[in-house]
Amino acid sequence: MRAIKSSIHCLFTALGLLVVAPLVGQEANGAEECPPSRQYPEGIAWIEQNSTLIGLMRQGFVGYEGDMPDARPLPQRSLRQHAEDLEASLRGSQLSGKPIHPDALYFTFYAGTAPENEPEAIVISKRDFWCLSRHGATVLLSDGVNHHTTGVFSVNRKDQAIYILDLWPERFFMLEGRNARGYTAQLFDFEHPLLRPFVQALLQGEEVLKEDFTRKLVKVDKKQYLKVIAGLVTLDTPEFIDYFFSINSTAAEDARTQLAFGLTLLHWGNNRFVDEAVEHVEKALELAQQTGNEKVERTAVNRLNLALLLEYYFARERGDVAAAEAKQNRRKRLSQRYGEERLVADNAAIDYYRLGSAAGHAGDFDNAIVFFTHAIEKKPDYQVAYLDRAVAKARKLDANGVVEDASKALELNVLERKALAAQRAERHPRDKMGRLRDSGREHYLNEWEALALRVRGTSLQSLRQYDRALRDGQRLVELEPDNPKGYALVGFSLLGKGETSKARASLEQAAARETEPQSLSMIMAAVNELGAPSEEDFFHQYRQAMLANDREAAQSLVDTYPGTARVVASNLVAQGQGALKALDLDGALGAYSVCLNLLEQIGDELNVGLVLNDMAVAHLLKGELHAALAAVRRANYIFRRHHNVDGERASADTLNRLFNRFGTEAEVEAFLEEHLVYAREHGLEEEFDLTSTQLERLRSD
Amino acid sequence: MTSESSRWDRLQTRFKNSIIGVVVLSLLAGAVFLTNALDIGQRLNDWINPPATDLLITPLAGANRPQPLDAYDVIEASTGAAASTVAPGIYPRGAKISVDLAHNRAGDATIVLRGIKLNSHFTPGLNPLYAYEAHTERVIGAGPIKPLVFHVALFGEKVGPAMRVIDAKKNLFVMSRSNENFLATEEPVLFELSPADDSESIDIEVTAEEPGLYEISFTLTYSVLGEVKTKETEPPIRIYYEGN
């Protein structure tokens, strides 16, 4: 499914560009004042295309908030804050596996003056706004009294006009005859050819017959657009900065502009761009020194120190000693010039937190603790700083320190949950973005609580406070029933209390869920000590039960020792893979067939899919095409059901390899006819149905 | 107790019969007569010439000072010789003005507002003393147009027609037919003030569209018992626009 969606994205993107083209005009011919618009890089273009289609889809279907009698208070978010919301959503999409460019980030441009509290905003001229306006950009328009955030559909540089895609076009404040300021914007009927298929794809193939897909764009002439443009947000990669300087080369020599780009790259969500950020902040510092701009110099010095320290820790984490030393030396030079106090004078709590995390990842736990402590000093209710300091203390084997910090983190967690509940109760029912933020916050609170319980519980065990550790483990299981760490904490705490049979049951549960080899072997060692059968004994007993066709006994064995069962299954997978690699096809199939039953009884469907695909490959290599087809089809179905793109790709590859063996359609047809018989003989009903359908389609084609 | 009362009675009789007593009592009686006679005269006069009902306009200063547009701060420039005649400060790009009107509660007559006219004196060109900057971070891009607010634009010497949103939901708005009178709309707008009414505010958002300095005020035309009167808002307000 995901692969299909991805290909739909690509198709829409390509076709979308063709659709926008006529409204764009011949940019190259008519745009002496601007170079051609920068094309969106791959992995960003489809986001813009999708946003456009979603905007078109929602036009006319979204209530105008001010119309409601109990209208919710408007979110008081500036354009830059709006960009931060977009960026948070983008990061979320990246984490969920959407094919988004890894370097994607938002740039915010303002007209007017450089804002004190939003130094990441880049202040530009009206001319630059015109050149930067492009399909997909979000713009803030203001005539001084009416302010409106909306989207650019396209820019026609030849006709000097811009087409706005607005959710409420009929109420656009610049429409001719509907404003006191002489604006003459026009409505423009438009039918996007991709809108219908897009909506259908979203509805998963359901026909949309009654829907009218005509939408309205607002055409604004360039002069009037430039009169009202107040801000612009655009999504791109750091390469966009070079493009911006190609539009406005003098801006490259402006300290404030260089600083704003540097800060955009250094933004807390973007550790990825710290190297690039250093370049711009250093340039800003140099320019500020030359021009005597003390304000920029002060900020640049502070940010540069932060960026260099982060780089130093990143280099240490990579094990690049030379690079770490170079960063350290640069930072020392900065310190010599400005003094250590000035370098950190404007540090915020979040800066210290970032440094603490970077130091922790680089293994410098002493300094990590120092940085987290500074963060807590700056922000005494900084829950995650307490939590991460607890983790750092755990690495220093300071169990009492861990218990203290994790307890404080848990205390703050409770307080924040209460505050969140109160905030939720007050949220307006239509405040979707607010509720989304609340859910995001709750997700983090759950994660933090789980981590705090885990860290504290483990330390309590080492302090032999098993009752408290047990309570933490039980709460962790309640909070995250799929997390093996909770069961392990419960199991080991019970073990400490001497309750061995209960301990074994919990540790078996932990082993059944654990994927980290080191943790698993530790748990299994404890399980074995507690009298569970060894892996070999388990395998033997299980095999006997299966050979005797006693599935019930086999299932009971799996249920009693789920952890051992899982380890045995993993061993069998490894054995099968090894045999397959060595082209010991019978060996591979032997191991896999036992493993397949075991995994089915454990309920690990995804691994069933993996095994089936490997079995299909083995059958294919053996020339057992019918068995191969039956196995790979089942594997493919499982992967699709679990949205496992890699598995889907691998099984599709196996299928291709199978059917590529046939030279003609007639050969395929003959094979499928044979396969029908095979399916019937083996009692494979679904396989029989699938093959019948495939045959029918082949014949009708 | 009995002897004291008779002493007081004797004193009263003696006072009434004395010359001083006669004079004092006569003067008191005259004063009472004059008071009653004058009150009747006043009532008579009020009946013939009722007290002048009039419109009160709160000066556009102090607490009622216009507000700058969202993205701007008032330019607190030195106003020089003309300081006393204009409102302090210069409003970049435009201003949000609230004209507070009230009945003077003299008389029972209703005041009917007939017209609002924006007077503008325009000085083209830029003045570096008045340089200003827009604070885009303060501009929150959301929300419908505020209803029942007059929007007027200044195009140099020319004042544009006033627009007023009546109902944003129905996309209903009115545009004045003449820039001489905000209230000259297709659908007549009736503003009335009776003595029982609280004060009423007329919100006007003025923006400049051509660069230069504008000195503006509003002339309000109203009628009381058929008599048409005018009053001008004070002090004049200055708006400055640097252009794009």
Image (cartoon, rainbow, N blue to C red):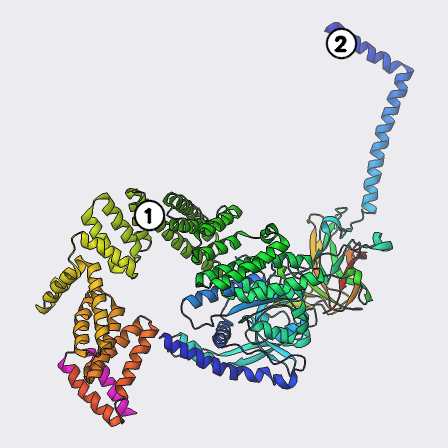
| Magenta stretch encompasses residue A170 | no
Q: Is residue B103 visible?
A: yes
Q: Is residue A413 above or below residue A30?
A: above
**Residue lying at the far right of the rendered structure:** B19
**Which residue lies under the disc numbered 1?**
A457
Question: What SS does tag 1 mark?
Answer: helix
* CA separation in Å, label 2 and label 1: 102 Å
Q: Is residue B102 above or below residue A166?
A: above
Quarter of the image that includes the N terminus of chain A: bottom left
Mark 2 or mark 1: which is in front? 1
Question: What SS does tag 2 mark?
Answer: helix
**Residue lying at the far top of the rendered structure:** B3
Looking at the image, residue A52 sits to the left or right of residue A647; the answer is right
| Magenta stretch encompasses residue A686 | yes
Quarter of the image that includes the C terminus of chain A: bottom left
**Which residue lies under the disc numbered 2?**
B5
Image quadrant where residue A549 sits:
bottom left
Magenta part of the protein: which range?
A680-701
Looking at the picture, how far across and down is residue B199, in whole percent? 70, 50
| Chain designation of label 2 | B
